[in-house]
Amino acid sequence: MTVQKDPEGTEIRHLAGSSVFEDQNLLEIGCGEGRLTWRVAPLSGRLTGIDPQADALRVAAAECPAELRETVKFVRASALDLPFPHETFDIAILSWSF
């Protein structure tokens, strides 16, 4: 049985209800295969998704919608050791990660 996370869309409804992402550089921690990425990226200026799982990132990159390829990128990384200079991102989000 496949687990569906947030089938009612509550998560994105709350995130989209705020203009806080508009024109911001967003870091998505634990992006996995892009479940949330595709819904949040259109709300932001640029989005970088990180995940320690190379297989998940390959799926995310392959499934990235054409209209988001200019503004979304994926990096294999851990939130405990970010490979970015300080103040690279305006906002960081984490959802459904463990």
Image (cartoon, helix red, strand yellow):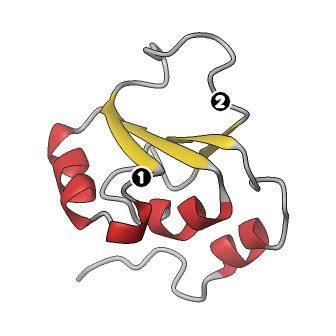
Which residue position is annotated with label 2? 89
The three-letter amino acid code for the residue at tag 1 is Glu
Point 27% across, 56% down: residue:
60
Q: Is residue 46 visible to us here? A: yes
Dot 1, crowdedness within 10 Å: few (<14), some or many (≥20)? few
Q: Is residue 14 left or right of residue 68?
A: right
On-image quarter of the C terminus: top left
The secondary element bearing badge 1 is classed as loop
Which residue position is annotated with label 1? 70
Q: Nearer the viewer, residue 28 or 41?
A: 41
The secondary element bearing badge 2 is classed as loop
Q: Is residue 56 above or below residue 11?
A: above
Q: Position of residue 64 (x, y in %)?
A: 31, 63
Q: Is residue 65 visible to us here? A: no
Q: Is residue 59 left or right of residue 94?
A: left
Point 53% across, 46% down: residue:
47
Q: Nearer the viewer, residue 51 or 7?
A: 51
Point 26% across, 79% down: residue:
2
Q: Is residue 8 left or right of residue 50?
A: right
Q: Position of residue 97 (x, y in %)?
A: 47, 48
Q: Nearer the viewer, residue 59 or 78?
A: 59
Dot 2, crowdedness within 10 Å: few (<14), some or many (≥20)? some
Q: In the rendered structure, which disc, 2 or 1, sits on the residue that comes first in sequence? A: 1
Q: Position of residue 12 (x, y in %)?
A: 65, 73
Answer with the quarter of the image where residue 78 lies. top left
Measure the C-alpha gap from mark 2 to mark 1. Answer: 17 Å
